[in-house]
Image (tube, rainbow, N blue to C red):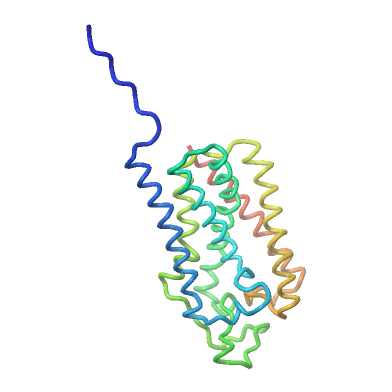
């Protein structure tokens, strides 16, 4: 009688699990190191303001991405349905937001950096942030740091989604996705408007020079863009 064939292994191999865990933890480490290094380049002016660095959509998005990758890393070692479900819910917000951040940041930083980078007020205390004066000195981040804040998060979430996750199905892909987009956008918009009412300016000069109605349109367009990006990526997922 022929020997019974060995039963196929269940779940990912140890090497695959280690590779996933390494990927998720390295992404978090790179982002956090980039964030912690910001003060060495631009100082701590905005940290002292109301809202601190959480005024920045970049930082809010990075927090969401770190939570997503952190939950993924824990789930790599201790797979648990509730943990995985929480990761997918946070990722539903983090991935579209990070892609939107990259889509806004890189064109502006390349073509009109004075609209994205606040003037260095220590070097030019009379710089008018509201006017986003081209004469005010701008402090650019080193490329490795810039990538860690404005490119790696989006790229890592896309890689994680296509290689390590399944696509979203209704109601997550429609009703929940729409609700998340509305809640995230309205939450950040209310928060940054509140901070600006106290600080006298927005963290991003292009928001400061816009009228209130212009900013509302900007928030709405960004939310729609993020939602469309999510639906496109989800449709491309096998």
Q: Nearer the viewer, residue 196 or 21?
A: 21
User: What residue is at 67 percent from the left and 59 percent from the top?
Assistant: 221
Please count the marks in the image. 0
79 vs 66, nearest the viewer: 79
Is 109 placed above or below 176 here? below
Q: Position of residue 25 (x, y in %)?
A: 42, 55
Place residue 220 in its image quadrant: bottom right
Residue at 72% of width from left, 63% of height from top? 217
Q: Position of residue 127 (x, y in %)?
A: 62, 90
Find residue 3 and report its horizontal and vertical position in percent.
Answer: 24, 13
Residue situated furthest front in the rendering: 78
Q: Is residue 89 left or right of residue 40?
A: right
Left or right, 16 with respect to 165, comes to left
Is 1 on the left or on the right of 179, as rendered? left
- In the picture, the quarter occupied by the N terminus is top left
* 126 relative position to 21: left or right: right
On the image, which quarter does residue 135 sit in? bottom right
In this picture, is 5 found above or below 128? above
Q: Residue at x 71, y 53 (%)?
A: 182
State the image coordinates of residue 186 (x, y, percent, origin top left). Answer: 72, 59
Above or below — where is 123 with respect to 45? below
């Amino acid at each position: 009688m022929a020997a019974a064939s060995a039963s196929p292994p269940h779940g990912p191999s140890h090497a695959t699990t280690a590779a996933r865990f390494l990927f998720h933890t390295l992404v978090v480490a790179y982002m956090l190191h980039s964030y912690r290094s910001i003060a060495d380049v631009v100082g701590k002016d905005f940290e002292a303001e109301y809202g601190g660095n959480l005024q920045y959509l970049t930082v809010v998005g990075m927090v969401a991405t770190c939570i997503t990758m952190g939950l993924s890393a824990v789930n790599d070692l201790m797979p648990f349905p509730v943990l995985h479900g929480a990761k997918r819910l946070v990722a539903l917000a983090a991935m579209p937001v990070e892609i939107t951040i990259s889509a806004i940041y890189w064109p502006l930083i390349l073509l009109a950096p004075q609209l994205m980078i606040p003037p260095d007020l220590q070097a030019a205390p009379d710089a008018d942030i509201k006017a986003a004066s081209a004469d005010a000195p701008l402090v650019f981040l080193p490329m490795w740091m810039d990538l860690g804040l404005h490119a790696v998060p989006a790229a890592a979430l896309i890689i994680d989604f296509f290689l390590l996750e399944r696509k979203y199905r209704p109601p997550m892909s429609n009703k929940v996705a729409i609700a998340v987009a509305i809640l995230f956008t309205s939450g950040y918009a209310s928060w940054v408007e509140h901070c600006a009412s106290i600080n006298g300016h927005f963290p991003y000069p292009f928001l400061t020079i816009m009228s209130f109605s212009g900013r509302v349109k900007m928030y709405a367009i960004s939310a729609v863009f993020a939602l469309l990006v999510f639906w496109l990526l989800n449709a491309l997922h096998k």
